[in-house]
Image (tube, helix red, strand yellow):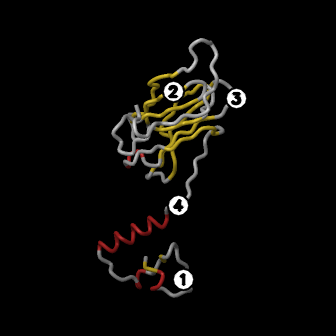
Amino acid sequence: LQPRGWCSGAQRGVRGWQAVPRSRRRGEGSASTRLRQRIWAMAKKREIYTYQAPWNVYGMGWSNRKDDAFSFRFAAGSFRQEYNNKVDIIQYSEEKDEFVRRGGFDHPYPTTKISWIPDPASSSPDLLATSGDYLRIWRVEDGAGPDDCNVRKVCLLNNSKSSDYCAPLTSLDWNQVDTN
């Protein structure tokens, strides 16, 4: 690969770089070869990624963590007009170059909002909050394999003390200064 300016205008380029026949390449050393391979790999990457959920998505929230193990991760909740719904943890996979499902859990009723703990420094446990009929806090932990995670419910917060029925919670927010 060489910058576009080194080739004739009749050749087609990809993001400012073009393939040049081996006989016309300069600098065939190992460092230049690795640089060309890296630039070519970057040129092949897509800019827009999609994920097709197996159900209609109602609630969604992106993770705020900055470390590479949790980059480009989000949770998506299903919308089914029944009691049994799902929340999936989705993360970008470098090896597959797409979003993949890493784990999930059952959730009663659709989630009206999903929010990850605001912890860019990754100093707290990885927590996820969902609202629906109640406010639920979930802990997300790495699983046995590289592409799976375990999710367990930490607590259920109920606003109603006197009735057997509850009103739906439509939203939630984390306190970014004090996450406790």
What is the total number of numbered labels drawn onto the structure image?
Answer: 4
N-term mark: 3 or 1? 1
Mark 3 — residue?
A: 81
In the image, farthest residue toward the right: 81
- Give the number of the mark in front: 3 or 1: 3
Mark 2 or 4 closer to N-term? 4
Q: Is residue 56 left or right of residue 89?
A: right
Asked whether 99 or 145 is in front, the reply is: 99
Gap in angstroms between the C-alphas marked 3 and 4: 35 Å
**Image quadrant of residue 59?**
top right
Q: Residue at x 61, y 45 (%)?
A: 52
Q: Secondary structure at mark 4?
A: loop
Image mark for residue 11:
1
Q: Are marks 2 and 4 in contact (CB under 8 Å)?
A: no
Alpha carbon separation for disc pair 1 and 4: 22 Å
Q: Residue at x 70, y 29 (%)?
A: 81
Residue placed most toward the observer, 129 or 45: 129
| Looking at the image, residue 120 lies above or below residue 4 | above
Which one is closest to the eye, mark 1 or mark 4? 4
- Mark linked to residue 46: 4
Nearest to N terminus: mark 3 or mark 4? 4
Callout 2 secondary element = strand
Comes first in the chain, label 1 or label 2: 1
Kind of residue sitting beneath label 3: Gln
Label 3 sits on a secondary structure element that is loop
Which residue type does callout 1 highlight? Answer: Gln
- What's under tag 4, amino acid-wise? Arg
**Dividing the image into 4 quarters, which one contains the N terminus?**
bottom left
User: Residue at point 36% right, 83% down?
Assistant: 26
Residue 67 vertical position relative to residue 124 in the rendered view, above or below: below
Which residue position holds label 2? 136
Q: Residue shown at 51%/36% (left/top)?
A: 173
